Amino acid sequence: MTVKQLALPELTEACVRLGIPGIGLWREPVQSYGVEATAKLVRDAGLTVTTLCRGGFFTTVTDLDDNRAAIDEAATLGTDTLVLVSGGLPPGSKDLPAARHVIAEALTELAPYAAARGVRLAIEPLHPMYAADRCAVSTLDQALALAEPFPASQVGVVVDTYHIWWDDRAPAAVARAGAQGRIHAFQLADWTTPLPAGVLTGRGQLGDGTIDLRAWRQLVDAAGYTGPIEVELFNDTLWARDGVEALAETTRRYIRHAL
Amino acid sequence: MTVKQLALPELTEACVRLGIPGIGLWREPVQSYGVEATAKLVRDAGLTVTTLCRGGFFTTVTDLDDNRAAIDEAATLGTDTLVLVSGGLPPGSKDLPAARHVIAEALTELAPYAAARGVRLAIEPLHPMYAADRCAVSTLDQALALAEPFPASQVGVVVDTYHIWWDDRAPAAVARAGAQGRIHAFQLADWTTPLPAGVLTGRGQLGDGTIDLRAWRQLVDAAGYTGPIEVELFNDTLWARDGVEALAETTRRYIRHAL
């Protein structure tokens, strides 16, 4: 998503050239290119698919068929992790606890299906500014509480700096998640202001904002996480640039601010 | 601030006509009209000043003179409560705990000065989307932790639905704050999306959004709060309308959704 202006063949080629060993993919471009074709493209380039994004939106869809399809796609792509953006309030509702209950029930139904296909569900807490319309799970503590009824091999969490950097309880939650083996993905983005209208496309390039990215990386390291580190930027300015150049800059920024 | 298009004489007159018994004031219009003159205007109308907004921004100003001036103004206006927006990260900093430490130190210096003038300091946690640039205090738990070293008569918190509605820990914090006598102000605004650019002027008219305002009012009631209830909307659409009509609508919405 960081360089969504690149088609998948350009993206894989650029990753190889820049020494990036894996890619987190989103469903839409994968479906357009073809799931099997994408799997072959990435595999032939010697890369891995780190995660597939995303399942979820449990609170506004009536059945879980599309989530099962997402799990199938993750399995076909050869990634072990499906990121879940759980969904906000259904239309007309003002009841966040009820929304979280619906999310818990959906996990109960999906976790065995995913486990049977070798896919882990990774609950991503989203910044509280998305609580109404995208994700009623706003903190790492909440995400962990939703995951804990399941084996860690089935359900875990996503640690994304953009969403949790403000939270003074998040460092302890990272440690707890790590000790349980539930950090299923680690994503970096920086926090910059002013936020754009709609607050979706203002994630800062690494180093441009207020998040101590290396400190978070060290926390996640200390929690025992050894998996891939993803950079996930939704950024209008970055998307307007040449994709390969934007990816190269992101790589340099990653080395400078997080490695 | 809800109807900042109204000059203070129009505002007091409209409040009297609508049966609104008190007004929360902001410093800028008060200073323009004159602090003593405002105090007399409001008093002669038979109204009270519920709170003065705002002191704070401790993390980006080097001395506390302006905060002492705000306390003096609150005392002159006859309100017992100065709302504090504590400030975000200083330029170049990525250290939220350090910012919170600076805030705690400023409180230590200001609390006795305020107490001597009969003014309580009310720490307002702001929504986490303001953590970088406006307020490093993002949760009611954090605000309470900052207040607890002081007598409740000196330092308390602001419960503002807009800032805390997403937080599953906030109801318990409201109860604790109430038990300690530290709810020094209670403010209502609704949460509507999409947020506007800069995320400052999109607070929803009561009933237009996703917050169960009456439930929060009942929580605050149950916590023992008996003080005024303020409606604080920053809303471009509301500001563009006739101020008296906007205030009348706000009164109707308050009765319908919170009373």
Image (spheres, coloured by chain):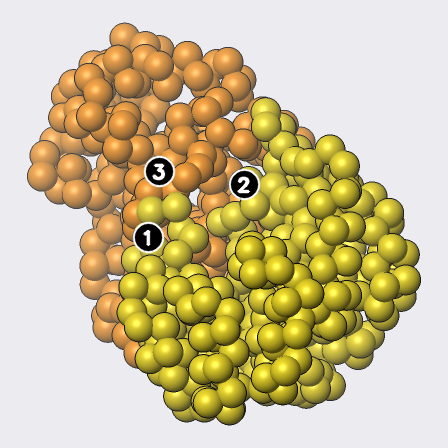
Chain colours: A yellow, B orange
1 vs 3, front mark: 1
Kindly identify which chain the residue marked by label 2 belongs to.
Answer: A
Badge 1 amino acid: Pro
Depth check: give the residue in front, B125 or A10.
A10
Assess disc 2: are there few (<14), some (14-19) or many (≥20) residues with their C-alpha within 10 Å of its C-alpha. Answer: some
Please determine whether, in this image, residue A68 is positioned above or below residue B41: below
Earlier residue among tags 2 and 1: 2
Say what secondary structure mark 1 lies in: loop
Say which quarter of the image contains residue B233. top left
Residue at the image position 63 percent from the left and 53 percent from the top: A85
| Label ID, residue A186 | none
2 vs 3, front mark: 2
x%, y% of residue A36? Answer: 68, 65
According to the image, label 3 marks what residue? Answer: B202
Badge 3 amino acid: Gly
Q: CA distance from mark 1 to mark 3?
A: 13 Å
According to the image, label 2 marks what residue? Answer: A133
According to the image, label 1 marks what residue? Answer: A196
Kindly identify which chain the residue marked by label 3 belongs to.
Answer: B
